[in-house]
Image (tube, rainbow, N blue to C red):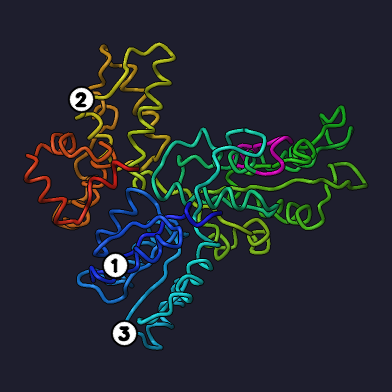
Amino acid sequence: MPPGQHRILVVDDDPGLLKLLSLRLQANGYIVETASSGRQALGSISARLPQLVITDLRMQGMDGMDLFDAIQKQAPALPVIMLTAHGNIPDAVRATRKGMSSYLTKPFDAGELLQSIRDALQHAPLDTPAETADGEKWHEKIIGNSPVMATLLEKTHRVAQTDVSVLIQSPSGTGKELLARALHLASPRRKAPFVPVNCAAIPENLLESELFGHRRGAFTGATSNRKGLFESAHGGSLFLDEIGDMPMEFQAKLLRVLEDGEVRPVGSSSAFPVDVRVISATHANLEQAIEEGRFREDLYYRLNVVMLEIPPLSQRREDIPLLARHFLKQAGERGCKARRFSPEALRALMLAPWPGNVRQLLNVVEQAAALSPVPVVSEALVQEALRHRPEEITPLAQAQQEFERDYLVDLLQATAGNVTRAARLAKRNRTEFYRLLHRHELVPELFRRS
């Protein structure tokens, strides 16, 4: 990828060094954004995910190490290069142990910095292709443009080009099957079948027959040969949902198939090879299940070559307006009168806790749309669908600063950086709203660009 396609965020509270670094990187073909503090950098990342962050270590307020920790929570695949005039071995060891891409001591050599940038960008979250090589849109059904989702889709696209087993471990209602289908469509196996199976929905005594098939006469009721789901997915992908509910006895049989690449139908004396990529998913903590003796450790490592984690909806609130409008449009296609949300209704959706994630949001939107007698969905209908309980909202006194910043980011995302609209939604005048943005070092223009 040409360097000009890479966006680098440079963070330093020294204006002179910030300008010098920007000019040097721009001269080498990179797109450069700047931030004069760690908190301003987080706002910039919330607006648009860069491919690399270069930050000073010693800064007023949030220092470089604190910024790195926050980036790890917000976009864990984003590489970070640390610069400092106070370099010492303990700092370097601590930085590298935490997973920092590089650590350079000022004054640094320009060639060394550029080489560190090139090395870091080899593993950067690139702008993920929207289409596969044959023009198929591989993640069109996944709605969202938040940094955490951009990072997830980039990782999904990268692992899709390999043929390793993938485990999707995420809370219920986040869309694990959608991600599994997207991974399949982004892979070289896209023209072959994608076969989903819910392990929790199949009775234990039928699981082996369903997955491996059976021969006529293998058991009572087996009046003919039947092809199993592994064979149906030959050449493609088999999606094993709720893998954590699979019985222990069958786990050993599944492990044998994964290790040997062969399936033996029930009632058959011989096995035959299958070419299947296994994508599994669970909402359960499989490591805890291993400790409790409910899941085989060897099977876990066979399934979990790469883990993908879909963030809960509460961690990607900037995607809520996109998702809600998408679901409302679908409801309109089924005959509902509702066409848009009132500002108050959208604000209620943005602030709800969403323990049921995207599945709950879909349910709330469908219910509100079905009951709305007019094109505009009101806040009252949204609150009724939410069955809102005030105790579910975190008290302001417990996390005022964090809550206030996240709230402002949500508003800027929802209004695309339009301060007038954001202030109106917050029921604050523009002067006061600008003061709040300044306090949290949030720049509206960055959200307009995204």
Q: Where residue 442 appears, x then y in whole percent?
A: 22, 52
Q: Which residue is mark 2?
A: 380
Q: Which residue is mark 1?
A: 18
User: In the image, what residue type sits under mark 3?
Assistant: His
Alpha-carbon neighbours of circle 1 within 10 Å: few (<14), some, or many (≥20)?
Answer: some
Query: Real-space Cα distance between discs 2 and 3?
Result: 56 Å
For label 3, the residue is 86
Q: Secondary structure at mark 3?
A: loop
Judge the density around disc 2: few (<14), some (14-19), many (≥20) Cα neighbours within 10 Å. few
Which residues, given as a range, are shown in magenta? 187-202
Foreground: disc 1 or disc 2: 1
Q: Is residue 353 above or below residue 425?
A: below
Question: Which residue is nearer to you in this view: 423 or 34?
Answer: 34
* Mark 2 / mark 3, whichever is N-terminal: 3
Q: Determine the image quadrant of residue 296.
A: bottom right
Name the quadrant of the N terminus: bottom right
